[in-house]
Image (cartoon, grey):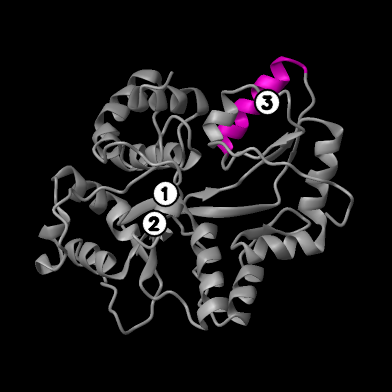
């Protein structure tokens, strides 16, 4: 790096990081608050160095393909995606989607039978025992099933976990990184609809425009109407790690790099900003998504209850 810092990265799922030994590292960078809170609580209990930086954020989204989005939204009685309107971003009422999955609907049942896919309609996730996106999706499902409120005690949390478990284990063996499967050339057969982060999709579209002069019109995003932001927390575990965290959070060139990777960045006063990302996408001729912040917000269960739910659903060891 220009600042004289050489960085070596070890890749792992957020929850795997949170439940593992991190003492050999200068920093960790889990994707969301639940995993970050586990790490911070452990460091606090052991009286070890930990300083938090929050340089950017990204909503949880469902990546899919235009014909799958058209079939799904039509099946839910919502606005379909049409091949010629060029629209890349859609939203879905989660209660309606949950009911569709609960009925056991199959893709071939939707969209007047145009999809040659007899699999059950399920949103695919990585392993709930290791990945923050899957744990967040679990919390989102529980919030919806429980009448737009998180569980308040262990009994309620475990009952909800049992209710939503089929939506996560019904997909079979989970993948490691759903965005990679979705964006692969053979992605339609691997992950026709998958949970990941908005920035992963936008980074793909930015690359596609630069390489082909136009967006990838076949791949689209669906946003849960009850919005759920994820804020990756950079946790410095040493003073050297803290120096890097300050650079990532404050250096203008690194903030620009975050925009190029599809992230929404925080302003110096800590406020959320989607405007800078919209400006960057507009400069490339890409449409910008909405703010991702609706009037309805999803609230995840308290960490101890979410952990119980993750263990119940995933059988984590």
Q: Which mark, by number, is residue 167?
A: none
Task: Indicate which disc, 3 or 2, sits on the residue closer to the N terminus.
Answer: 3
Query: In this figure, which residue is indicated by the disc labeled 3?
Result: 22
* Relative vertical location of residue 111 with respect to residue 148 in this rendering, above or below: below
- Give the magenta-colored segment's residue range: 33-47
* Relative vertical location of residue 229 with respect to residue 218 in this rendering, above or below: above
In the image, taking residue 12 as reference, residue 260 lies left or right, namely right
Q: CA gap, disc 2 to disc 1?
A: 6 Å
Res 131 seen here: yes
Helix, strand or loop for the magenta stretch, by majority: helix
Query: In this figure, which residue is indicated by the disc labeled 2?
Result: 182
* Relative vertical location of residue 149 with respect to residue 113 in this rendering, above or below: above
Where's residue 19, x and y in %? 56, 23
Q: Residue at x 77, y 44 (%)?
A: 7
CA neighbours of label 2 inside 10 A, class few (<14), some (14 to 19), many (20+):
many
Q: Is residue 65 magenta?
A: no
* The N terminus: image quadrant: bottom right
Res 227 seen here: no
Q: Which element carries disc 3, helix, strand or loop?
A: loop
Badge 3 vs badge 2, beta-carbon distance below 8 Å: no
Badge 2 vs badge 1, beta-carbon distance below 8 Å: yes
* Viewer-nearest residue: 96 or 54: 54
Query: In this figure, which residue is indicated by the disc labeled 1?
Result: 178
Q: Which element carries disc 2, helix, strand or loop?
A: helix
* The C terminus: image quadrant: top left
Q: Residue at x 80, y 25 (%)?
A: 49
Where's residue 27, x and y in %? 73, 35
CA neighbours of label 3 inside 10 A, class few (<14), some (14 to 19), many (20+):
some
Based on the displayed image, in which of its 4 quarters is residue 92 positioned? bottom left
């Amino acid at each position: 790096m220009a600042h004289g810092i050489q960085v070596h990265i070890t890749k792992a799922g957020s929850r795997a990081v949170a439940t593992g030994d991190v003492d050999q590292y200068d920093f960790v960078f889990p994707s969301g608050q639940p995993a970050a809170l586990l790490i911070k609580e452990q460091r606090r209990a052991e009286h070890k160095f930990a300083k938090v930086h929050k340089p950017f954020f990204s909503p949880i989204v469902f990546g899919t393909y235009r014909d799958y989005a058209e079939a799904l939204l039509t099946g839910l009685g919502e606005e379909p995606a049409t091949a010629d309107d060029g629209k890349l971003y859609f939203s879905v009422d989660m209660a309606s989607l949950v009911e569709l999955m609960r009925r056991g609907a199959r893709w071939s049942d939707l969209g007047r039978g145009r999809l040659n896919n007899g699999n059950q309609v399920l949103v695919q996730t990585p392993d709930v025992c290791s990945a923050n996106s899957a744990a967040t999706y679990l919390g989102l499902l529980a919030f919806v099933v429980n009448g737009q409120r998180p569980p308040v005690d262990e009994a309620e949390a475990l009952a909800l976990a049992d209710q939503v478990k089929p939506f996560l284990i019904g997909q079979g063996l989970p993948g490691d990184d759903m965005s990679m499967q979705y964006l692969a050339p053979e992605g339609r057969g691997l992950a026709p609809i998958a949970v990941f982060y908005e920035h992963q999709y936008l980074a793909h579209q930015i690359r596609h425009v630069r390489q082909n002069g136009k967006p990838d019109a076949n791949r689209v995003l669906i946003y849960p109407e009850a919005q759920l932001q994820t804020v990756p927390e950079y946790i410095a575990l040493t003073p050297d790690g803290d120096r890097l965290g300050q650079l990532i959070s404050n250096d203008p060139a690194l903030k620009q790099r975050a925009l190029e990777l599809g992230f929404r960045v925080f302003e110096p006063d800590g406020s959320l900003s989607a405007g800078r990302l919209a400006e960057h996408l507009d400069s490339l001729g890409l449409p910008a998504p909405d703010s991702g912040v609706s009037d309805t917000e999803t609230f995840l269960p308290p960490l101890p209850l979410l952990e119980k739910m993750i263990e119940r659903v995933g059988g984590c060891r």
